Amino acid sequence: MTEETGATPAGVPIEQPEKSGQEKYYVRFTLPQRYLHAVLFSSFLGLAATGLPMRFSDNWAAGHFAKAVGGFGAILFFHKFCAIILTLAFLFHLKDVATRAFIHKEKGMFWGPTSMVANWKDVQDIVGHIRWFLGLGPKPKFDRYAYWEKFDYWAVFWGMIVIGFSGYAMWFAPFFARFLPGWALNAVLVVHGEEALLAILFIFSIHFVNTHLRPGSFPMDMVIFSGKETEEEFKKKRTLEYERVAAEGKLKTREGDKPVYWWINFAKVVGFTAILIGLVLLVLTLIAYFGGA
Amino acid sequence: MAGPFFALFALVGKCRVLKGFPGEVDMPGVSAHRRTLSSALAAVLLVGAPFVLRAQTDCLSCHADKTLQDAAGHSVGVDADKFHGSMHGSLSCTDCHTSIKEYPHPDTVTPVKCVACHADQAKAIGGSIHDGVSANPCTSCHGDAHAIFPKDDPRSAVYPLNIPRTCGTCHANEALAKKYGLQNVYATYMDSIHGYAVSKEGLLVAANCMSCHGSHNILSHKDAKSTTSRMNIPNTCGTCHGGVKDEYLNGVHGKALVSGNEKVPVCSDCHTAHAILQPTDSTFRMQSTPICGSCHKDQLATYRDTFHSQLGLLGGYVETARCWDCHGAHGILPASDPASPVNKANLIKTCGRCHADANASFVQYQPHANPHNRKLNPALYYVRTFMNLLLWCTLSFFTLHTLLWFIRAKKEQDQARLAAEAKHD
């Protein structure tokens, strides 16, 4: 997801009375972007929950899960269903990026401080961040998207292309066989399974901890659900962006309403459910992988 | 036929009817007679001399009373109508009960010996696994000695549809099964496709116990001459399944068996002996793959890695290719044989049975590819190696990265809290 210049406060349509001294909120994600994340993680959980039993089909838990939901037919149906949802979400995102870049001629989509594309500063940040981990230097200041956030984005991007292509190649094997060599039909299952395993392990451990469970964000970073963060968070987490927007005098345009309680509570229920499912799947995956099942 | 005397005989005859016949049926007639001594004496006195028994009617004048019992309480009554209609209905009682020639009966009565007429059968039983197992081997299977019918008569205990029940008298008996170390095969047979055909459809040609095991000459399957020995099973099953037998004998397994290799699968290895299922049954489809895999271990392992296996293992999709869907079942041929369904020339047709759009490129898919084998599947090997490398590098880097970050962030948070507390104080 790339920078949305001139974003309007979107999402929670409840007006809060302005009070002096009340904490200011700034918009980080637009409503469509938050929806995209919700669709992404819902369908990903569905794909993981149905894909893992196939990958580890001789595992004890896989058999019981399959039996409970109605066997392989049900699992594959749900897997394909989630795959279509995720494919549509991916295509929607591509269309969104293309529209903004080529039709609205938005600046900074593919290069610059607000772009998702990696640049030299990200390399410096990795080194600087690790030096800070080890107590060898100061904590780097990050812009709109930190390097690990960019990695998350591109990992998912690459993953969707690889897993998606190999998945459809299996789904429509005779069609794909018209232009793929024979061995590729064997390879797509290996690629699909391994890349999916990487995605599952990465999201359910690295992404969960980096984004939600680490001190500073624990137990969950709500910004992807509410779209907004406090001025303090903005300053602390995305210092360079805050400074740049402030220097441009555009802070006012980024201001948003304080998220309402019911929405935050609802998001917490959904978010924690997702994290819980993810952690359970992570444990089962590790057991199946190292259990040699 | 001395009518006046019949009434008297009715008072006396309390000799036990021979329940089993050949061999060692004991006849405690003496004590029985002692109990009714007075009435017997009365009869003798009246008649004046022993009465010579000549015809059935003579005996039946007493023994037709179905409630008649000997002293030990054994029934000695005979169902006259049934007996007349039975196989032996035209015989005289004394033809079998040879030691009873007159009334009153002698003190000791010798057991009936079926062997006198049925020498061949007696000999067969003598050499069989049932030798000495039963005190009354003939009646154990043929039932009531006075109601033996031809085996094609539905009243016969050895009528095809009655055989499972007859054999089941012992072979469904758990105590007996335990004693002889037998499996309780009756229940599994009755639930099998053969048992179903017999019990539900009344199919006379369906295999019953006798069809495979024989009757009087049943031998242990360990005996090379047994109809159920490994070498003979294809012939035994082939009695009915002739076409399948021919196919089997032309395939690699059949040829190996004929050449003396007993390790190759015979019919019962895949189909089991008693619990034979319809091959399209999901249980059968699932249970047979590991059977092939018990010898073809590598093939099973590589099959397990494929979608075909994963689908089946999770249930509900048993239609996916199992071993014999591609290789054939009975007449398995080497892939090099042009007649083999997995011969290159036949793959489009074989795969096409499930994959309607199978084309030349599609059938290059290797259902037993091994991503760990660089020699056999180089492309797959490198793809897998690359994917694994990607997985482990990414995860290793980020796990370390996250761990260090977590520790540092925690430290900083704690310091900030301490500082805040110090400020507060």
Image (cartoon, grey):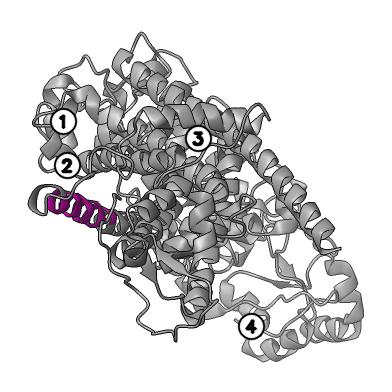
Pick whichever of labels 1 and 3 is earlier in the sequence: 3
Pick whichever of labels 4 and 1 is earlier in the sequence: 4
- Does dot 3 land on a helix, a strand or a loop? loop
Q: Is residue B180 magenta?
A: no
Kindly check if marks 3 and 4 are in contact, taking CB atoms under 8 A apart as contact.
Answer: no
Circle 2: is it few (<14), some (14-19), or many (20+) Cα within 10 Å? some
**What residue does disc 4 label?**
B61
Instruction: State how far apart marks 4 and 1 are (Cα).
Output: 86 Å
> Which label belongs to residue B362?
1
Residue at 29% from the left image edge and 51% from the top image edge:
A3
- Does dot 4 land on a helix, a strand or a loop? helix
- Does dot 1 land on a helix, a strand or a loop? helix
**What residue does disc 2 label?**
B355
**To which quarter of the image does residue A76 belong?**
bottom left
* Front in this rendered view, residue A103 or B68: A103
Instruction: Chain letter for mark 2, please.
Output: B
**What residue does disc 3 label?**
B228
Going by the image, does A285 lie left or right of B107?
left
For marks 4 and 1, give the one nearer the viewer.
1
Residue stretch rendered in magenta on the structure: A86-100
For marks 2 and 3, give the one nearer the viewer.
2
Question: Looking at numbered disc 2 in the image, what kind of residue is underneath it?
Answer: His
For marks 4 and 2, give the one nearer the viewer.
2
For marks 3 and 4, give the one nearer the viewer.
3
Pick whichever of labels 2 and 1 is earlier in the sequence: 2
Pick whichever of labels 3 and 4 is earlier in the sequence: 4
- Does dot 2 land on a helix, a strand or a loop? loop
Magenta part, dominant SS: helix
Q: Against B68, is B287 above or below? A: above
Instruction: State how far apart marks 3 and 4 are (Cα).
Output: 49 Å
**To which quarter of the image does residue A86 belong?**
bottom left
Kindly check if marks 2 and 1 are in contact, taking CB atoms under 8 A apart as contact.
Answer: yes
